[in-house]
């Protein structure tokens, strides 16, 4: 069966209608995997949640979930806390409770957590792009359960300009270090983003011992100079987490420099989520939709 990746769920549909085709045909590798029953992270029940046993079956049909998303009846997509929740805890205060129809692009949307949260804050057009078919199926499932009108589309970040449309807000979390050509992609994002971008990425550890020696300086006065910031490490093969899709790890100043090159001029205070994880909001003006405080 071919999954329609542009599928949009209807808020008023029966809970199970349209959900069965989202699960893989193969038997799950972990049919008895635990699913969290902690409701503390969500005080609102999804409007289209199936009965608990059916919901458990749908969740467990996928061999693995990266994002932890609440789907009703005390059921989350995974038992362990997800990095998406930690990031959202820090990001949510910067986002208005009412986005008043602002358009949002979620690059590398995974199972759709951030796209759905933005839609729940009254965003207008919300599009999530992703390259993994399995993550897209997860996103469509979560979108159906929550009854949010989010579109998910299979598209590589390097092809963003092919969308042919602009967005007020771009979410760019957990994606930068997966790009073969990060500056080129950020410039493309800058060309279609009207207001602000949220970037969260793996970064080089901030250490006073970090330095490279490069030939730089004005014309006629070039010399070998020590540089401690604005660095990026190339990742070859599976050096980082055994994942061949990791290509570059920048430092914090490199991230900001690329964002400036892409047309963003105002920055929030950078936030270290861990020693190697960094989040920042960059905007094109002082009076944008997202708080830069």
Image (tube, rainbow, N blue to C red):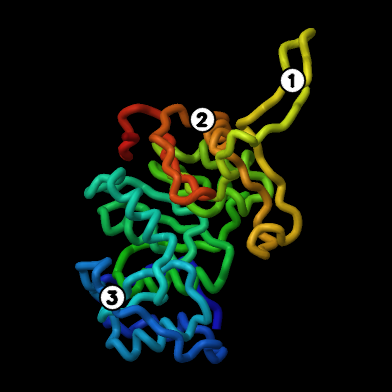
Quadrant location, the N terminus: bottom right
Query: Which image quadrant is residue 49 in?
Result: bottom left
Q: Position of residue 216 (x, y in %)?
A: 74, 20
In this view, the residue in front, 230 or 197, is 230
N-terminal of the two: label 2 or label 1?
1
Q: Nearer the viewer, residue 235 or 194?
A: 235
Residue 227 image position (x, y, % from top left): 67, 27
**Residue at the outermost front position:** 209
How many other residues sit within 10 Å of disc 2, few (<14), some (14-19) or many (≥20)? some
Q: Which residue is mark 1?
A: 216
Q: Residue at x 66, y 59 (%)?
A: 245
Between the C-alphas of marks 1 and 3, the distance is 55 Å
Residue 225 quadrant: top right
SS at circle 1: strand
Distance (Cα) linking label 3 and label 2: 42 Å
Q: Residue at x 45, y 53 (%)?
A: 106
Real-space Cα separation, disc 2 to disc 1, in angstroms: 24 Å
Using the image, determine if residue 207 lies above or below residue 176: above
Point 32% across, 75% down: residue? 71
Residue holding disc 3: 38
């Amino acid at each position: 069966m071919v999954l329609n990746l542009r599928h949009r769920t209807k808020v008023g549909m029966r809970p199970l209608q349209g959900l069965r085709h989202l699960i893989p045909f193969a038997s799950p590798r972990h049919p008895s995997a635990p699913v969290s029953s902690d409701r503390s992270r969500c005080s609102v029940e999804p409007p289209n949640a199936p009965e608990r046993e059916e919901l458990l079956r749908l969740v467990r049909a996928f061999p693995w979930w990266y994002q932890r998303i609440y789907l009703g009846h005390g059921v989350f997509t995974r038992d362990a806390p997800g990095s998406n929740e930690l990031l959202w805890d820090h990001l949510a205060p910067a986002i208005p409770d009412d986005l008043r129809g602002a358009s949002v692009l979620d690059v590398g949307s995974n199972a759709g957590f951030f796209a759905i949260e933005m839609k729940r804050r009254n965003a207008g057009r919300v599009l999530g792009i992703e390259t993994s078919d399995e993550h897209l199926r997860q996103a469509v499932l979560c979108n159906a359960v929550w009854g949010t009108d989010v579109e998910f589309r299979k598209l590589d970040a390097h092809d963003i300009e092919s969308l042919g449309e602009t967005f007020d807000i771009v979410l760019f979390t957990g994606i930068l270090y997966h790009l073969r050509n990060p500056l080129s992609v950020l410039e493309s994002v800058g060309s279609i983003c009207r207001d602000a971008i949220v970037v969260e990425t793996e970064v080089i550890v901030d250490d006073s011992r970090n330095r490279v020696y490069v030939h730089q300086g004005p014309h006629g006065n070039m010399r070998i100079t020590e540089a401690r910031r604005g660095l990026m490490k190339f990742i070859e093969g599976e050096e980082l987490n055994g994942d061949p899709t990791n290509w570059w790890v920048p430092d914090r100043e490199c991230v900001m420099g690329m964002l400036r090159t892409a047309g963003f001029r105002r920055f929030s205070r950078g936030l270290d989520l861990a020693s190697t994880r960094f989040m920042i909001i960059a905007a094109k003006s002082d009076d944008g939709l997202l708080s830069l405080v």
